[in-house]
Amino acid sequence: MYFTMFMLGILYAIFGLFLIASGMPILFVGGIVGVMVVVQYYLSDRLILMSTGAKQVSESEEPELHRMVKLLADRYGMPMPKVAVINTQIPNAFATGRNPKNALVAVTTGIQQRLSERELQAVIGHELAHVANRDMRVLAVANFLVTLTSFLMTMLFWNMLFGGMGGRRNNGGGAVMMVYLVTIVVYFIGQLLVLALTRYREYGADHTGAEISGDPGALADALEKISGTVNQIPDKDLRKLQTANAFLIIPAALKGEGSMHLFSTHPPLQERIKRLRELEQRMRYGVR
Amino acid sequence: MSTVVKAEAKLQSLGEITPSRRAGVIYRNSDDVAFLKDIRTELDTVLYQGVGATKTAFEIVDDDRGMRWIVLEDGKFNDLVSSVYTVGNAIGANGGSEYLIAAVFELYFTGTVEDNTYRSGLRTYWIYRYDRKAFYPFVPTGENEGDRDRPTEARLGHDLRKHGLTIEKSLTEWMGLWGIPF
């Protein structure tokens, strides 16, 4: 993970120097994007409440949920976060907040219904781990870099379009074109690095959450339940399949999941579950 | 098949599982195959004659779905596994390979409830599908088709894979066998 952060730092340091050298109004653009990101960072809990339709709930409204969050927050040594519920059948949960003092944890009614107490506790533990690990801060920096680059890309695009049509610029067109191309490349590499980074933070939160609860299996069970992977196990009896064509099925080959991994913010579920199960084994029996 | 012995030994040493004395091979019966027609005599030869014969007791059971089971019983798990292997091999090598469906091992969980391990006393089967050349766990919770403890199966699947057993990757292929005659 530190390697990824390091690469991201290097990438943008070089890019910054390149922009300054090419005479771009980098401070101006950086300033605008910076303000946007900072606003987002400070208002994240309120913005999330607005955009997801999460409703903050009091202790009397959701005593069980409050008790669970309180217990976990205590274990992390953080103050009691705000608790919210989203009224939807889709099982999900998230936490936000720039620091433990301003944290908000939200769960959907769908996840409340589906998971056992032990599993829900593991999920909330995972979300609070994001807060405890200050993942919002990492995300804000990453967000800043990516937004900045995409902003520049748009700006340069229009600049080229109109600059080109004006056609009176001496020498400018080629240089702008070059900056534009570099920006595109940086944007894509940066994006991949940021995605890798968020995936590492996911594993990190899985791990922290497991340490706090002492029960990594609970999160693995929860993930399996939410993802519906377990429900792939069929109702069908094997004897119904005993026709000749059953033997033509290609044996369980490695299915190509390949490069799609590069573009996702969450690590593949199977991998997370596998790591949690391994952690469970280690915690149960000591390192083997 | 030797991985079965290893995976079982590992889980048993962790105090999580204990094998029962029984296992079985299930196949679609056919009189077109001479070996299957004379199965009793053939298995007597295969399991009882020759050096190193396991002398595992066996029984032939026809289930209500028209399938035939060779139910094997042996107190030594190693012998039980190698007998299952031998029976499957003998049928496969004598023209019956397309009739073979699965090999099934019966085991019991011995883990305790308190520390969130498997529920003690729960019966589980490890099914080996001959067509897929892979294992998967099966934990029935009733006699009706579809009655099974999926979360426990998923969990056990992870453990078994970790201990070296070739586990069927596609969960949709983990088909159950309800009403196993042993």
Image (cartoon, coloured by chain):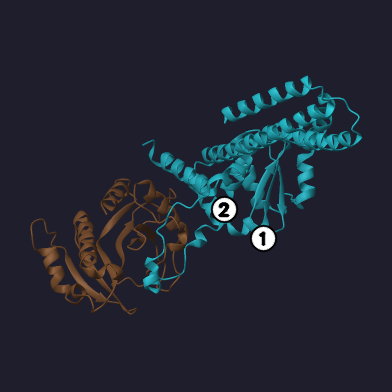
Chain colours: A cyan, B brown
Task: Label 1: state its secondary structure.
Answer: loop
Q: Is A119 positioned to the left or the right of A132 in the image?
A: left
The type of residue carrying mark 1 is Gln
Residue B37 seen anywhere in this rendered image of the structure? yes
Residue identified by numbered label 1: A89
Q: Which of A170 and A77 is in front in this view?
A: A170
Residue B182 seen anywhere in this rendered image of the structure? no
> Residue at coordinates 35% horizontally, 46% vertically from top-left?
B163
Q: Is A185 positioned to the left or the right of A31 in the image?
A: left
Residue A252 in the image: above or below residue B65: above
What is the chain identity of the residue bearing mark 1?
A
Q: Is A276 positioned to the left or the right of A64 in the image?
A: left
* Quadrant in the picture for residue A228: bottom right
Residue identified by numbered label 2: A117
Residue A86 in the image: above or below residue B145: above
* Quadrant in the picture for residue B169: bottom left
Q: Is A213 positioned to the left or the right of A169 in the image?
A: left
Gap in angstroms between the C-alphas marked 1 and 2: 17 Å
Give the mark nearer the N terminus: 1 vs 2.
1
Q: Nearer the viewer, residue B65 or B129?
A: B129
Q: Which of B31 and A131 is in front in this view?
A: B31
> Residue at coordinates 82% horizontally, 22% vertically from top-left?
A23
Task: Label 2: state its secondary structure.
Answer: helix
Disc 2 crowd rating (10 Å Cα; few below 14, some 14-19, many 20+) is: some
Q: Residue B170, image x and y in percent?
A: 45, 58
> Residue at coordinates 65% horizontally, 35% vertically from top-left?
A194
The type of residue carrying mark 2 is Glu
Residue B117 in the image: above or below residue A12: below
